[in-house]
Image (cartoon, coloured by chain):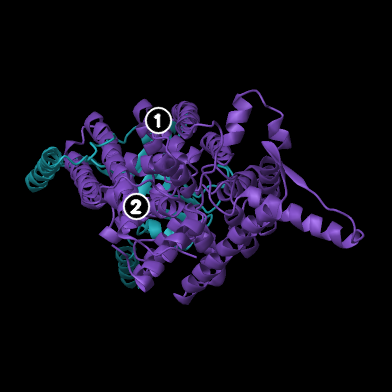
């Protein structure tokens, strides 16, 4: 039986949201530093206003909803779901004030796309945006999707109580690197920062080699490193990586995208000396299989469609976009319009499937996740075996994901439930998009991109798209980042509260 | 008869424009297949220059889209201002061959310039801070500081614990 909602429940949630407000307020100070370094003093007020609103909101929540009660699972999940709405709404203030988008709804879209690591953009004239605003867009992806806002807040606040652990799970991260949740959070940040530094150095070297000046190489390198590792996909240029027309940029991006799509636990295990884990891990095997298969099939399809004239071109277009889709990053070296009008439908469908499946669990990527696909495939194999063996035979099974994990019915049910919810949401999103007059394959592509937090676009996402679609894609990005369950719990919480009322 | 022929030739000459009318960047992207391997004219603002040996990649921005143009390095060196937040880049007129998927450059969409002319020099934009926005930001920051200290004071008075940010 579900206990009726109490006023105290709302207080627990609201009170714990204050830290997210303070965190966003603090995060907005980094772009101020960029503005000062780049001499863009006129943009400083945008961030100050956003930061001040975050502090005021945090203080109001902290004062008016003060409670000593500990968070329970339901509070933590609802808090995580709301945190992923409040943080983007606060961070969208500077984007809106800087006129980087045509309206506040577009700024919110941009911010949600940033925090969730999607990369679909409604920014107007990216090539002429202030460096500070461009940095903010990329930094949101690194902080939001590359690390996780709750992970950062836990790491800074150093809180170890049960509520923090639950909130951590609410953010769709179930990582057991270390027994202490704070230590785990700090390790996640450490891994992210390590890849950020490596990526920045590599992108900067590529930039200098390809003829960019040092300052632009560093700035673009830092930003692309943040979004490549975070499998976010924002770029400092409207052409995305096509701006550079460089295989070096594409290779560095592919390496970082794949690193970002790997499980944090795997990174930690490999760094700790367990190198054989790379070969044994079910997620790595499936990810590599997915990348190779989709890359080969798309390249072959493009070859038969006579789209690209050389082997290098087929590799750079086919394999690069397969990696970008599978890791749910969204960098592209093709104009969105070309996806829509020129790419063969088969390649578009393959990219959509790759976006739906996504990368590894507990990584920066989105989608259903490889571990769930692995569990479902193993379970399918077990069912087939069960049908062939005598009734008296006892079936057991395990899969290897850092440890050998028994394939229990509970795990299979959980994976199936998530995959089913995901596919239902995807179907509804694609049908609604198609109802706006877009072709079904384009609708599937763009919906898979939004829900999987990918960011590849076939041109549907633009400032001129219908407002209803903008809102729906914002919802899909948010639900996809939280792996749907947290959103369903939030809805259940609201509906239950409305039906039964809130007790004092 | 000669006079009529001469008049006809002069009339034809007057009808022919001096240079082909430039295509818009968006037109080139949206109708790439019909422009493929054909000579096109594009005029746009320079938003990026990358010199690579004897050639250079110049990104031109026109009508909301940017297109990469490959030209000689010495042409690219004529560019003095690159467009960004603080600058309007040089305007360049390019006549060249459009490639929907360039065989020479990894299948990327580009234009290989035969003729590259800087038609207008870019300029720096006035990006001074808006006074009203500055006032608004100061007001918000002052309000935030006031709220923090006001609530702390109430906390002390009521002996309630209102946690300080990040405690």
Residue A304: mark:
none
Outermost residue, right side: A390
Chain of the residue on which disc 1 is drawn:
A
Q: Position of residue A213 (x, y in %)?
A: 37, 28
Quote the CA–CA distance across marks 2 and 1. 43 Å
Q: Residue at x 73, y 49 (%)?
A: A407
Of A110 and A52, which appears nearest the observer?
A52
Which chain has been coloured cyan in this picture? Answer: B
Q: Position of residue A390 (x, y in %)?
A: 92, 60
Secondary structure, mark 2, is helix
Residue with the mark numbered 2: A13
Q: Residue at x 24, y 35 (%)?
A: A32
Q: Residue at x 68, y 33 (%)?
A: A278
Of A373 and A35, which appears nearest the observer?
A373
Mark 1, Cα crowd under 10 Å, few <14 / some 14-19 / many 20+, is: many
Q: Position of residue B28 (x, y in %)?
A: 44, 58
Q: Tell me the mark number nearer the camera, choosing from 2 and 1.
A: 2
Residue with the mark numbered 1: A217
Q: Is residue B95 left or right of residue A283?
A: left
- Chain A: what color? purple
Figure check: A389 above or below A243: below
């Amino acid at each position: 039986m579900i206990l009726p909602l109490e006023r105290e429940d709302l207080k627990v949630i609201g009170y714990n949201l204050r830290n997210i407000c303070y965190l966003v307020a603090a995060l907005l100070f980094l772009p101020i530093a960029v503005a000062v370094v780049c001499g863009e003093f006129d943009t400083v007020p945008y961030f100050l206003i956003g930061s001040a609103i975050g502090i005021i909101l945090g203080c109001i929540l902290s004062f008016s909803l003060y409670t000593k009660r500990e968070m329970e699972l339901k509070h933590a999940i609802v808090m995580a779901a709301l945190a992923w709405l409040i943080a983007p709404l606060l961070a969208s203030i500077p984007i809106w004030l800087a006129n980087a988008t045509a309206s506040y709804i577009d700024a919110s879209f941009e911010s949600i796309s940033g925090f969730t690591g999607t990369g679909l953009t409604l920014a107007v004239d990216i090539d002429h945006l202030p460096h500070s605003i461009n940095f903010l867009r990329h930094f949101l992806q690194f902080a939001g999707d590359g690390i996780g806002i709750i992970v950062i807040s836990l790491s800074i606040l150093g809180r170890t109580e049960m509520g923090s652990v639950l909130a951590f799970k609410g953010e769709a991260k179930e990582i057991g690197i270390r027994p202490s949740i704070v230590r785990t959070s700090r390790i996640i940040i450490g891994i992210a920062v390590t890849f950020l530094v490596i990526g920045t150095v590599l992108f900067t070297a590529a930039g200098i080699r390809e003829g960019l000046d040092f300052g632009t190489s560093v700035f673009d390198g830092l930003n692309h490193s943040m979004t490549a590792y975070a499998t976010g996909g924002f770029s400092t240029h409207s052409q995305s990586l096509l701006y550079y027309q460089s295989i070096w940029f594409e290779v560095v991006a592919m390496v970082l995208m794949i690193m970002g799509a790997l499980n944090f636990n795997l990174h930690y295990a490999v760094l700790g000396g367990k190198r054989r884990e790379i070969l044994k891990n079910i997620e790595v095997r499936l990810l590599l299989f997915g990348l190779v298969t989709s890359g080969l099939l798309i390249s072959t399809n493009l070859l038969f469609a006579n789209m690209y004239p050389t082997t290098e071109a087929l590799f750079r277009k086919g394999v690069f976009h397969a990696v970008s889709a599978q890791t749910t990053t969204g960098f592209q070296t093709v104009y969105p319009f070309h996806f829509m009008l020129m790419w063969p439908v088969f390649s578009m469908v393959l990219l959509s499937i790759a976006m739906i499946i996504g990368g590894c669990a507990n990584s920066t990527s989105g989608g259903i996740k490889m571990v769930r696909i692995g569990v479902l495939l193993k379970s399918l194999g077990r069912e087939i075996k069960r049908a062939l063996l005598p009734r008296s035979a006892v079936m057991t099974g395990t899969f290897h994901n850092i440890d050998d994990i028994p394939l229990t019915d509970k795990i299979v049910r959980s994976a199936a439930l998530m995959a089913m919810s995901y596919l239902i949401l995807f179907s509804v999103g694609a049908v609604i998009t198609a109802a706006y007059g877009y072709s079904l394959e384009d609708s599937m592509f763009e919906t898979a991109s939004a829900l999987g937090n990918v960011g590849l676009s076939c041109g549907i996402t633009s400032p001129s798209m219908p407002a209803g679609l903008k809102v729906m894609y914002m919802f899909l990005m948010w639900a996809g980042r939280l792996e749907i369950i947290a959103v369903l719990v939030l809805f259940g919480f609201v509906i239950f509260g409305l039906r039964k009322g809130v007790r004092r | 008869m000669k006079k009529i022929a001469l008049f006809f030739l002069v009339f034809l000459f007057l009808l022919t424009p001096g240079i082909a009318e430039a295509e818009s960047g968006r037109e080139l992207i949206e109708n790439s297949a019909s422009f493929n391997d054909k000579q096109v004219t594009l005029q746009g603002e320079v938003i990026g220059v990358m010199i690579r040996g004897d050639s250079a990649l110049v990104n031109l921005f026109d009508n909301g889209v940017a297109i990469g143009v490959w030209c000689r390095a010495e042409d690219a060196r004529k560019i003095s201002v690159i467009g960004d937040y603080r600058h309007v880049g040089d305007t360049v007129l390019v006549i060249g061959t459009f490639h929907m998927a360039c065989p020479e450059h990894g299948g990327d969409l580009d234009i290989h310039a035969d003729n590259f002319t800087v038609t207008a020099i870019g300029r720096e934009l006035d990006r001074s801070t808006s006074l009203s926005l500055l006032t608004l930001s100061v007001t918000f920051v002052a309000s935030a500081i006031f709220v923090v200290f006001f609530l702390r004071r109430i906390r002390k008075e009521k002996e309630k614990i209102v946690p300080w940010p990040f405690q």
